[in-house]
């Protein structure tokens, strides 16, 4: 019986996952985002960088361009992740 309830819960969770807003799905997909820019410190990071986790959501900007484009925007590469 308990296994059956767990299976139903899983199905509900999977269904809920499909209704996640598009921006959230994009934010979790490192293949489409090249870098995370910090609008406060003007540094840019690889999406998996540990500093990104500590960054305030309001300071984050998801960037889809190249490294050179980020530098041209006035951003400096992070010293932790060396993007
Ligand atoms: Zn970094």
Image (cartoon, grey):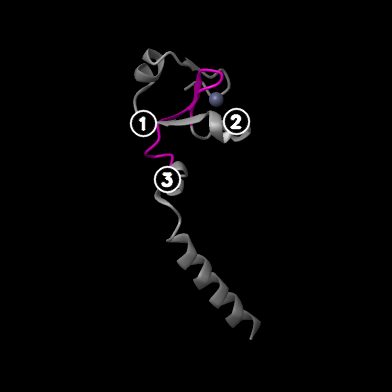
Q: Pinpoint residue 24: horizontal percent, then vertical percent.
A: 46, 47
Dot 3: what SS? helix
In the rendered image, which residue does mark 3 sit on? 23
Marks 3,1: beta carbons within 8 A: no
Q: Earlier in the sequence, mark 3 or mark 1?
A: 3
In the rendered image, which residue does mark 2 sit on? 55
Real-space CA distance between mark 2 and mark 1, rounded to the nearest whole angstrom: 18 Å
Taking the view exactly as shown, the residue that stands out farthest to the front is 58
Residue 31, compared with residue 49, is above or below; it is below
Circle 3 Cα neighbour tier, 10 Å, few/some/many (<14 / 14–19 / ≥20): few
Observer-side mark, 3 or 1, equals 3
The image quarter in which residue 20 lies: bottom left
Q: Residue at x 46, y 16 (%)?
A: 75
Circle 1 Cα neighbour tier, 10 Å, few/some/many (<14 / 14–19 / ≥20): some
Q: What's the magenta region?
A: 29-46
Dot 1: what SS? loop
In the rendered image, which residue does mark 1 sit on? 64
Q: Pinpoint residue 28: horizontal percent, then vertical percent.
A: 47, 44
Real-space CA distance between mark 3 and mark 1, rounded to the nearest whole angstrom: 13 Å
How many marks are shown on the rendered structure? Answer: 3
């Amino acid at each position: 019986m308990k296994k059956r309830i767990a299976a139903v819960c899983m199905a509900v969770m999977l269904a809920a996952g499909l209704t996640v807003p598009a921006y959230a799905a994009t934010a979790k997909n490192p293949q489409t985002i090249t870098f995370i820019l910090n609008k406060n410190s003007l540094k840019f990071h690889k999406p998996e960088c540990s500093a990104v986790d500590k960054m305030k959501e309001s300071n984050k900007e998801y960037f889809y361009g190249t490294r050179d484009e980020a530098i041209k925007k006035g951003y400096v590469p992070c010293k932790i992740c060396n993007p």
